[in-house]
């Protein structure tokens, strides 16, 4: 049975299992174990629950992937977006994700002898529209190389009534496509991922991540570049500005206290230039 670190992370540099499985269901761990993860910020906690039986795994996460460092952007009323940034409030949860993955092929070995291929499916329930959107994904390892991809449908409900602009609450439907490639070098993991959110305009997010493990400590650093039509928030002037490319940075420190317990500190996970905490349990 793997330890806490191996169960939740595998060969991914992504510091949280929740952010992995909400965009690619094939990232759900399949090892025979039960895992619980929480991301703590202000007075709230985002929880992800994972259960595997050795070949099949399932995950439940009652939170969004949007407006997190490793997820896609979202559609938001500009006034709400600016106020949320000023108050350093995370994007309100309106999604619940149920995902499952199955091992298609798994072979241990050294060099290119290590092979793993998983497929996954997911459903995202929107608590405001009461609709379910489907998604599929594929994830694999070939020796030191890692790769993955997913495609899923989603939707977001907007509410302009507070500002007297519209009496209705329009629903924006869109599709998200993701892929990632990486290099797994024992204690060092390098990864590039891209997310494309397709609607009338296409938004593209590029993320480059490096993760280093040393004994019981994991250090992660990432750069995110968002190419989209939505404005950028200037933290100095506290105003929205027209800017096509938005750059953000992430840092993470995680420490494995025991084989089954890990704690961490995350910077800019919610794209608010904030600090949040993480806790991982494994049974």
Image: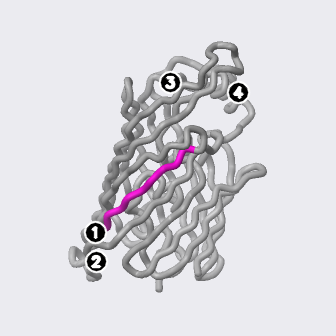
Q: Which residue lies most toward the top here?
A: 165
- Quadrant location of the C terminus? bottom right
Q: At 45% from the left edge and 60% from the top edge, which residue is drawn? A: 99
Q: Which residue is mark 4?
A: 83
* Residue sticking out furthest to the left: 112
Disc nearer the start of the sequence (4/2): 4
The earlier-in-sequence mark between 3 and 1 is 1
Which mark is drawn over residue 106?
Answer: 2
Residue at the spot of label 1? 117
Contact (CB < 8 A) between labels 1 and 2? Answer: yes
* Neighbours of disc 4 within 10 Å: few (<14), some (14-19), many (20+): few
**Counting other residues with Cα less than 10 Å from the Cα at mark 2, is it few (<14), some (14-19), or many (20 or more)?**
few
- Magenta segment, prevailing SS (helix, strand or loop): strand
Q: Is residue 12 left or right of residue 64?
A: left
Q: Over which residues does the magenta segment extend?
A: 117-126
**In the orientation shown, which residue stands out farthest toward the right?**
43
Residue 13, given in percent of the width and then of the height, sits at: 45, 60
Distance Cα–Cα, label 3 vs label 2: 42 Å
Q: Quadrant of residue 191?
A: bottom left
Disc 1 residue crowd, few under 14, some 14–19, many 20+, Cα 10 Å:
some
Mark 3–mark 4 distance (CA, rounded to whole Å) = 15 Å
Q: Nearer the viewer, residue 161 or 176?
A: 161
Please identify the quarter of the rendering in which residue 173 is found.
Answer: top left
Q: Which mark is residue 230?
A: 3
**Residue at the spot x=37%, y=38% of the render?**
196
Q: Residue 116: percent from the left, percent from the top?
A: 29, 72
Depicted 76 relative to depicted 35: above or below = above
Task: Reply yes or no: does residue 101 show up in magenta.
Answer: no
């Amino acid at each position: 049975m793997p330890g806490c670190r191996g169960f939740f992370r595998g060969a991914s540099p992504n510091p949280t299992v929740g952010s992995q499985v909400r965009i690619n269901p094939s990232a759900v761990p399949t090892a025979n174990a039960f895992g619980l993860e929480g991301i703590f910020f202000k007075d709230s906690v985002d929880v992800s629950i994972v259960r595997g039986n050795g070949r099949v795994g399932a995950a439940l996460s009652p939170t969004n992937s949007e407006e997190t460092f490793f997820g896609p952007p979202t559609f938001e009323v500009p006034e709400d977006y600016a106020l949320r940034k000023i108050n350093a409030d995370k994007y309100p949860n309106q999604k619940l994700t149920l995902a499952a993955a199955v091992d298609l092929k798994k072979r241990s070995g050294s060099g290119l002898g290590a092979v793993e291929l998983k497929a996954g499916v997911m459903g995202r329930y929107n608590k405001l529209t009461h609709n379910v959107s489907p998604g599929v994904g594929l994830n694999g390892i070939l020796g030191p190389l890692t790769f993955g991809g997913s495609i899923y449908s989603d939707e977001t409900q907007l509410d302009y009534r507070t500002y007297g602009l519209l009496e209705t609450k329009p629903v924006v439907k869109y599709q998200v496509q993701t892929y990632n490639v990486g290099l797994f070098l024992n204690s060092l993991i390098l990864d590039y991922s891209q997310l494309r959110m397709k609607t009338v305009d296409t938004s593209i997010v590029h993320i480059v991540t490096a993760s280093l493990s040393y004994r019981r400590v994991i250090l992660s650093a990432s750069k995110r570049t968002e190419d989209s039509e939505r404005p950028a928030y200037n933290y100095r002037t506290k105003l929205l500005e027209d800017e096509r490319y938005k750059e953000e940075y992430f840092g993470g420190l995680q420490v494995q206290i025991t084989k089954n317990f890990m704690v961490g500190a995350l910077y800019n996970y919610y794209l608010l230039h904030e600090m949040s905490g993480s806790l991982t349990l494994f049974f």
